[in-house]
Amino acid sequence: MEAEYRMELRNVSKHFGEVQSLRNVDFRLGRNEVVGLVGDNGAGKSTMIKIMTGYYNPDEGELYFNGVKVDNLTVPKARSLGVETVYQERALAELQTLWRNIFLGREVNNRFGFLDVKKMREETYRLMNESMGFTSTAVTPDTPIMTFSGGEKQGVAIVRALYFDADIIILDEPTMGLSLGETRKLLEFVRTIKRAGKSAIFIDHNIFHVHSIADRVVVLDRGRIAGEFLTKDISLDALMEKMYRVAETGSLD
Ligand SMILES: Nc1ncnc2c1ncn2[C@@H]1O[C@H](COP(=O)(O)OP(=O)(O)O)[C@@H](O)[C@H]1O
Ligand SMILES: [Mg+2]
């Protein structure tokens, strides 16, 4: 039987010196669910993400993937469990071509053990047209990544993650510094995760983005889960009002 949750944190705490970044955090990510994680600067959002991706180990608490408890998660182990993080900066190899970036670290070899460049270029061409919406003749599988905009680069990283069957895609403030048009494109890429039947965690300061993308919004405040909402149950205005209240009082009530 399939586990109900793709991933779960139970009673997770993490401190750095004097700073208690996370306190007894319980969090669940469902199958084919997009969760928006919101909260003020320093609320612990990135720390939570880094625990899920094996970058930090929690001081206490447990992690489950597909219902199975995982101890001592590492970055490669998280990746093998289907977790992919899309970074604004480190997402791609700037000097390399589009096809190289799609297959970076997961190159396809032919039966002689050499790189199957033809196959990888063809697959990239197909992905460009079917998944990336790069229909301009200016873009080919051989276009260097550095000519792409910030939103497009993250889009490429999302398409790559889906192509290699990631189950959970994590985006930590992906729209930061993007223009309006780029943001719109990026949000469209995030929607493809949902359409592909996969799950995502989406962090953004802009409640409007979160509300338009997420199935559920989880509010973090000074290391604690302050509450959560199904986006279908709460209007954008009401969500904004709740966020102001959390910032002022630390509580959603
Ligand atoms: N590596 C670290 N060393 C020391 N303090 C850290 C570290 N990472 C995070 N923190 C602290 O933990 C708290 C939560 O940070 P973070 O998870 O980055 O919050 P958010 O992403 O919500 O802005 C902050 O007070 C931050 O300064
Ligand atoms: Mg952060």
Image (cartoon, rainbow, N blue to C red):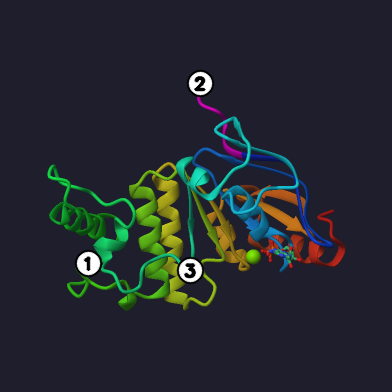
CA distance for labels 2 and 1:
41 Å
Outermost residue, front direction?
Answer: 113
The spot of residue 94 in percent (x, y) is 35, 73
Q: Considering the numbered disc 2 on the image, is that residue within a helix, a strand or a loop?
A: loop
Q: Residue at x 52, y 69 (%)?
A: 175
Q: Considering the numbered disc 3 on the image, is that residue within a helix, a strand or a loop?
A: loop
Q: Residue at x 27, y 62 (%)?
A: 100
Residue 88 bears which disc, if any? 3
Figure check: 30 above or below 114: above
Corner quadrant of residue 137: bottom left
Mark 1: C-beta under 8 Å from nearest atom of ligand 2:
no
Of 114 and 127, which appears nearest the observer?
Answer: 114
Task: Say left or right for 10 vs 103.
Answer: right
Q: Residues within 10 Å of mark 3 (few under 14, many from 20)?
A: some
The amino acid sitting under disc 2 is Met
Figure check: 26 above or below 225: above
The amino acid sitting under disc 1 is Thr
Q: Which residue is mark 1?
A: 135
- Does the magenta portion include 4? yes
Looking at the image, is mark 2 or mark 3 nearer the viewer? Answer: 3
Q: Quadrant of ligand 2?
A: bottom right
Q: Earlier in the sequence, mark 2 or mark 3?
A: 2
